Every structure is written in C-alpha cells, then in structure tokens.
Image (cartoon, rainbow, N blue to C red):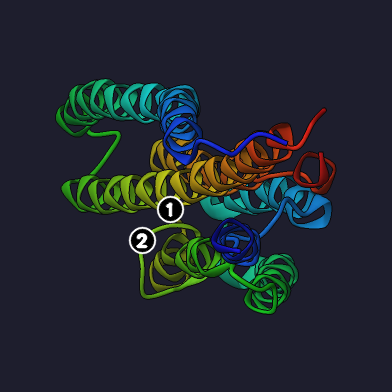
Amino acid sequence: MSAINFNEVFQSLETGVASIAKTSLQGYYDAAKADGENALESMKANLERWTQEVVSGTLTPDDLGYLLKEEAGLNEMTALKQAGLAEVKLDQFKGSLIGLIINTVTGLFKV
Amino acid sequence: MLVAASIIVLAGCATISRFDQYAYAQSTSLKVDALNVMNLASQQYDTHVSDITTVNTAMDKMVAYERNRPKNELSEKMWVMLRDTNQNLYGGFIRRWKNEGTLSPVFIKESQILIGQAFDQVSQLESGKIKTQQATN
C-alpha cells in the first residue's frame, strides 16, 4: 500500500467542511432573516391597527399597554425558537462532519 | 487515532434534544385549548374557573414533561414563558382576566393572534429538531 499523503487528506477535508458549512448554515440564515422581517412588518401593522382601535374606543390605553407587552413576549419566543434552530443546525453540521471524516478516512484504505 | 477521537467527541455531544412527537402534538393541541378558553374572557372569570384550571393543569404537565427531557432548556423556557402569570403571554392574559373580571372582545381577539403565534414558535422549534431516523442515517 502506498504512503498516505496527509496534506492531501486534510485539504480534502477542509474543502468538504466549507461546503457542508455553507449548505447547512445558509438555510438557517435565510429562515432567521425571514422571521425577523416578518416580525417587523407584523409589529408595524399591529401598532397601526391598535392605535386606531384606541382612537375608536374599542381598545383602552390599558389594553394597548398589555398588547405591547404580549408582543414583546412573542418576540422573545421567536428569538428562543431561532436559538434552538441554530443548535439543531449545529448538530446537523456535526453529523455531516462525522460522515465526511469517516468517508474520507475509509476511502484511503480502499483497494 | 486523532481522527477516531474527533469522531467520538463530535458524536457524543448533541447540542439540543431530538424531535419528540408527544411534545409536538401537545403544543398544537394546547394551543387550541388555550385559545378556546381565551374566547370565554368576555364573560366573568369566576364562571369559567373549571375550564381555566383544566388548561392550566395541562400546561403545567407540559412544563414538567419538557423539564425532564435532556438538553431541552430552550423548549422548557418557552413553555414557562407561555404559562407564567408574571409574564405577558397566556399566563399573563389569564392573570388580567382574573383581576378585571371580564375583558373586551377586541382585546381578546388581538391577544389570541399574538398568543397563538407564541404557541406556533414552540411547535416550529419542535418540528425543526432532528428526527431519530434522520440522526441514524
């Protein structure tokens, strides 16, 4: 069996890691960005509607105060969800990394 | 040797719990129950204590269930936020209902939208977790 060129092996692993990171983390970035944009649009629409409802008397200023606090709570829930989904992506990344290492190393010993 | 050690370290340290079908089903089911109870808030709190207690107890059980799943702190925290009467989601809504006796239909409707979305965040995190079948592939 010929000697193993570890520089080549690690170069191949580096390329693989970069590719896995790009594919697995891009999806998370896109989803988190969309969540943030939706939250902003929703906050704007809510504030406009609630203000009109206070003016028309169907909501009290007290109601408005509660709704703003509920919205802040919702935003915190969204942030916690995104933190969790980031951890999921990290685990998926680690899983792919294990696969890459195993495939690369076992490939060295194929005849 | 180094490679084998790296694989063992990587494989042995999952960051977050795996998908749990029961937790997912409960998050969607309790959302419906919570929004249904909120619908009653235009009527006197005292006349619906039994309905409220049923939902509160189911949520307390869910918090306990989530607390006992390993590496599940974020989901547990989300359930605590929903349930906690000192915060401003479902538990906060119930606290206000209790304090004020009745709530206005417009406030109830607007709260249902926000709190429904808060429950959705819990479901979306659970459904985004790695399924056991995926993990073993």
Number of labels in the image equals 2
Q: Which quarter of the figure is the N terminus of chain B placed in?
A: bottom right
Q: Is mark 2 on a helix, strand or loop?
A: loop
Q: Is residue B96 above or below residue B115?
A: below
Amino acid, disc 1: Leu
Q: Can residue B44 be seen in this view?
A: no
Task: Specify whether B87 is left or right of A4.
Answer: left
Say if A62 sits above or below A105 in the image. Answer: below
Q: Residue at x 67, y 39 (%)?
A: A99
> Neighbour class for label 1 at 10 Å: few (<14), some, many (≥20)?
many
Residue B88: which disc? 2
Mark closest to the chain's N terminus, 2 or 1: 2
Marks 2 and 1: which is nearer the front? 2
* Residue at figure coordinates x 82%, y 56% from the top left: B22
Please provide percent x and percent y for residue A22: 41, 24
> Pointers 2 and 1 in contact (CB under 8 A)?
no
> Residue B108: percent from the left, percent from the top?
46, 43
Camera-nearest residue between B18 and A76: B18
Q: Count residues near mark 2 (Cα–Cα under 10 Å), then give few for <14, some for 14-19, many for 20+.
A: many
Q: Is residue B54 visible?
A: yes
Q: Residue at x 46, y 73 (%)?
A: B84
User: What amino acid is found at the position of numbered circle 2 in the picture?
Assistant: Asn
Residue B31 shown left or right of residue B94 in the figure: right
**Between B127 and A68, which is closer to the camera in this rendering?**
B127
Q: Mark 1 points at which residue?
A: B103
Identify whether B108 is placed above or below B54.
above
**Whole-percent x and y of residue B62?**
70, 69
